[in-house]
Image: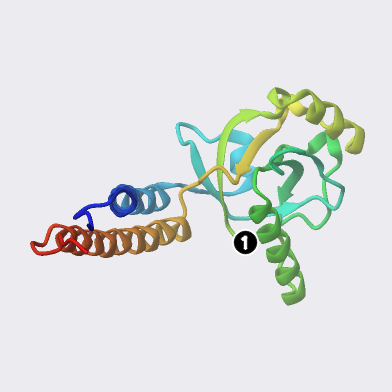
């Protein structure tokens, strides 16, 4: 005798329903956050390195650096052996300068918290160098602390590679911590559309599956 709703079929439908709800919640979150991130990206002020070093970020958590250049020296970094998470620090200076400043005059340190951002910045620098353009493209960064508040290994490593650097005078500009950019807003919207579409499809399949399991006449004795 077939059961109208055997254990395996019932469990499968339950999991499909749970997955559909999860996708729907994630899609809704992305669709709500996408416009917010876009608004935050539009509201982030554009600053030169000189302006940031002299006046700080003010009340703004995120800003767009428009003329940053990477020091020719080496980075200081650590990578988590378990997760592979990256934390890297590298001095910045204004791209309009013909010569890199002495370490004592450095006023900005770039913090990179994602391998994807490290590669993006590296590729951007190489592309601009090939075109003969100075510095990096615009960088949306989070600015919230001075370099003397960095982890102890970074506070030791930066002076070792850049003797004379005054960490207490350096702002830290961070990338890789979900800064508001037009690209991130677009990704959220795409994820939202994809997830909600998948959720709708899963719910349709769940409903058809559930309806078929409840149809009369499926019970029979063999």
Residue 26 in the image: above or below residue 213 = above
Q: How many marks?
A: 1
Q: Quadrant of the N terminus?
A: bottom left
Q: Outermost residue, bottom direction? A: 131
Left or right, 168 with respect to 8, comes to right
Q: Which color scheme does this rendered protein use?
A: rainbow
Residue at (55, 40) in percent of width and height: 142
Q: Nearer the viewer, residue 143 or 214?
A: 214
Left or right, 210 with respect to 27, comes to left
Q: Outermost residue, front direction? A: 222
Q: Position of residue 50 (x, y in %)?
A: 64, 44
Q: Nearer the viewer, residue 125 or 4?
A: 4
* Residue 101 location, quadrant: top right
Q: Nearer the viewer, residue 64 or 200?
A: 200
Q: Secondary structure at mark 1?
A: loop
Residue at (11, 62) in percent of width and height: 215
Q: Position of residue 18 (x, y in %)?
A: 31, 47
Is residue 191 visible to the viewer in this orientation of the structure?
Answer: yes
Q: Position of residue 147 (x, y in %)?
A: 71, 29
Q: Residues within 10 Å of mark 1 (few under 14, many from 20)?
A: some
Residue 56 in the image: above or below residue 38 = above
Q: Which residue does the numbered mark 1 point to in the structure image?
A: 137
Is residue 29 visible to the viewer in this orientation of the structure?
Answer: no
Residue at (59, 49) in percent of width and height: 48
Q: Quadrant of the C terminus?
A: bottom left
Q: Position of residue 90 (x, y in %)?
A: 77, 44
* Residue 150 location, quadrant: top right
Residue at (59, 46) in percent of width and height: 176
């Amino acid at each position: 005798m077939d059961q109208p709703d055997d254990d395996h079929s019932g469990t499968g439908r339950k999991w499909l329903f749970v997955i559909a709800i999860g996708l729907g919640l994630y899609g809704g979150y992305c669709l709500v956050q996408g416009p917010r991130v876009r608004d935050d990206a539009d509201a982030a002020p554009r600053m030169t390195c000189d302006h940031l070093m002299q006046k700080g970020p003010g009340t703004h958590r995120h800003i767009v650096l428009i003329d940053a250049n990477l020091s020719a020296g080496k980075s200081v970094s650590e990578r988590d052996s378990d997760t592979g998470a990256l934390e890297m620090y590298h001095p910045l200076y204004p791209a309009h300068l013909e010569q890199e400043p002495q370490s004592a005059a450095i006023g900005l340190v770039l913090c990179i918290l994602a391998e994807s951002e490290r590669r993006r910045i590296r590729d951007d620098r190489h592309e601009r160098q090939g075109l003969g353009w100075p510095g990096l493209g615009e960088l949306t960064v989070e600015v919230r602390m001075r370099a003397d508040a960095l982890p102890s290994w970074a506070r030791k490593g930066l002076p070792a590679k850049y003797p004379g650097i005054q960490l207490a005078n350096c702002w830290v500009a961070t990338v890789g911590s979900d800064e508001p950019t037009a690209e991130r807003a677009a990704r959220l919207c795409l994820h939202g559309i994809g997830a909600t579409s998948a959720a709708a499809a899963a719910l349709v399949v769940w409903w058809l599956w559930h309806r078929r399991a409840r149809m009369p006449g499926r019970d029979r004795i063999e």
